[in-house]
Amino acid sequence: MAYGVVANFRELDAVVEAVGALKKASVGKFTVYSPTIHHELEDAIGGGTSKVRRFTLIGGLLGASFGYWVSIWTSEYWPLVVGGKAIASWIPYTIIGFEMMVMVGALSTVFGMFILNGIPRIVVDPAYRAPFSHGDYGIHVDCAPDQESAAMDLLKKAGASEVQRAR
């Protein structure tokens, strides 16, 4: 069950101001809901770099390795000797290695985004409200009951159109 305070905002500037005030006051952990991506909001939240790029790197390296391996294995298993040339040469297999790198890297990126974002969500966040998907912005502050009034005042001063307890 969600505890704390949920605030509804209509303007992006008010949300950015509220995030800055919440970080400064350190009232509690907060979650921001936005209908679309805004760089101002990302800068205000100050999240770190995405961990999805690790999935992409590992998938790309595994894909390239598999592309070279399957090409060389096929040439060694069914050799086609032409004019004394090497049976397994890495130059023509670079195309297959590259294509496998792109395919496995892209699939692992999508897989990593699903894992890190928690998709599919079986249970909807209880602090989520429907207007957060239709143009309004929301902030859920997860704080102790004795800090709820301070969080409510802080969010109202920042320009929240509606502030209520999340229970």
Image (cartoon, grey):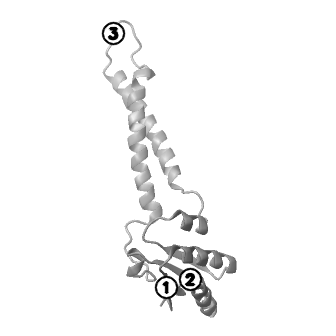
The one of 65 and 139 positioned closer to us in this rendering? 139
Mark closer to the chain start, 2 or 3: 3
Q: Are marks 2 and 1 in contact (CB under 8 Å)?
A: yes
Left or right: where 92 falls relative to 162: left
Question: The residue tagged with tag 1: helix, strand or loop?
Answer: loop
The one of 120 and 86 positioned closer to us in this rendering? 120
Q: Is residue 139 above or below residue 64?
A: below
Q: Residue at x 42, y 30 (%)?
A: 68
Tell me residue 122's x, y (percent): 37, 73
| Residue type highlighted by circle 3 | Val
Q: Residue at x 31, y 15 (%)?
A: 80
Q: Is residue 69 above or below residue 63?
A: above
Q: Are marks 2 and 3 in contact (CB under 8 Å)?
A: no
Mark seen at residue 82: 3
Q: Tell me the CA gap for discs 2 and 1.
A: 7 Å
Q: Which of the 4 image quarters holds residue 97?
A: top left
Mark closer to the chain start, 2 or 1: 1
Q: Of tags 2 and 3, which is closer to the observer?
A: 2
The one of 153 and 48 positioned closer to us in this rendering? 153
Tell me residue 4's x, y (percent): 55, 87
Left or right: where 18 falls relative to 162: right
Report crowding for label 2: few under 14, some 14 to 19, many 20 or more residues within 10 A (C-alpha): many
Q: Residue at x 46, y 83 (%)?
A: 127
Question: The residue tagged with tag 2: helix, strand or loop?
Answer: strand
| Residue type highlighted by circle 2 | Asp
Q: Which residue is mark 2?
A: 142
Q: Is residue 18 above or below residue 152?
A: above
Tell me residue 51's x, y (percent): 54, 56
Q: Tell me the CA gap for discs 1 and 3.
A: 71 Å
Q: Residue at x 47, y 64 (%)?
A: 37
The one of 11 and 28 positioned closer to us in this rendering? 11
Q: Which residue is mark 1?
A: 2
